[in-house]
Image (spheres, grey):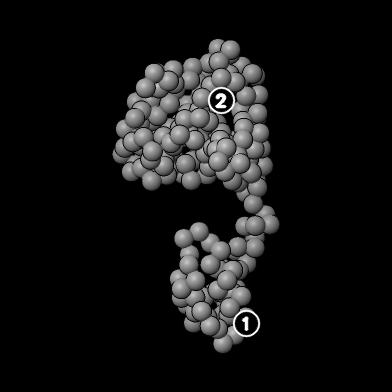
Amino acid sequence: MEFSSKILERAVNEMSQLPGIGKRTALRLVLHMLKQPKDQTIALVEALRTMREAIKFCKSCHNISDVELCEICANPSRDTSLICVVEDIRDVMAIENTSSFKGLYHVLGGKISPMDGVGPHDLNIESLVEKVKAGKIKELFFALSSTMEGDTTNFYIYKQIQDYKIFTSTIARGISVGDELEYADEVTLSRSIVNRVPFENSLKL
C-alpha cells in the first residue's frame, strides 16, 4: 500500500495493530478521523491517553477500575462469601449484564495455556488462593470459558484449594463446550449462572 504522506502511513500502521483491524480498515478509520472536526479527534486521543495513564486495577478482584477498590467490591449489597472466577473484564461485563449474580469477582487476567507460554504464575491465582485461605469465602464459582484452557485453569485452581472447606461450582453446560463466555447470549448465560453445578460434577464429564 503506497502512501503520499509518511504521517498518514504511520497513523495507519499504528491503527492496524489493533485486533481485527487490517491495513485497509485502518486507512478507512484514519481518513474518517481526518474528515472529523479537529477537536473530536483530539478528544479521542486524550481519552485514550487518560485511559492508559490513569486506569487502575482493583486491589481486591483485579477488575479494571478508576479507583483502588472497584464499584462492585465496594458495594455493600454484594455477597462477599461468593466469588466468581473469570478470565478478564469482558466476562465481568457479560455476567453483570445478566443481573443474575450478586457476589464478587476475581479476574485472573487470562487462562493457563502452555502453547502460548502462559502458566499459573502469570495469572492472579495466588491472590485467589489467599482469599480462600482467609476462610471468609463459602463458594467459588468458576465461570471461565468452556475450552481446554479454561478447564485446565479451573482444575488447577481446584487442586490448590481442595483442602479447604469451600463449595466449588461451575457454569451449567448451557454454555457449549468450546464457546467463549463473552459471546454467549444473556439468557443462556443467565441460566448457566443460576443453574450452576458443583465443580466436582464437571470432572466426571
User: Residue visible at 51% across and 25% down?
Assistant: 155
Task: Give the image location of residue 129, x and y in percent.
Answer: 62, 24
Q: Nearer the viewer, residue 171 or 117?
A: 117
Q: Secondary structure at mark 1?
A: helix
- Which dot marks residue 180? none
Q: Contact, CB < 8 Å: mark 1 with mark 2?
A: no
Q: Amino acid at mark 2?
A: Ile
Does residue 52 show up?
A: yes
Figure quadrant of residue 15: bottom right
Q: Which residue is pictured at 42% across the width and 20% down the height?
A: 203
Q: Residue at x 61, y 28 (%)?
A: 128
**Helix, strand, or loop for circle 2?**
helix
Disc on the earlier residue, 1 or 2: 1
For mark 2, does the 10 Å Cα neighbourhood hold few (<14), some (14 to 19), or many (20 or more) residues? Answer: some
Q: Position of residue 112 (x, y in %)?
A: 56, 35
Is residue 84 visible to us here?
A: no
| Residue 116 in which image quadrant | top right
Point out which mark residue 6 bears.
1
Residue 54's place in the image compared with 163, above or below, is below
Q: Position of residue 113 (x, y in %)?
A: 55, 38
- In the picture, the quarter occupied by the C terminus is top left
Rounded to the nearest whole Å, what is the CA distance between mark 1 and mark 2? 50 Å
Residue 61 screen position, x and y as percent? 60, 35
What residue does disc 2 label? 157
135 above or below 65? Answer: above
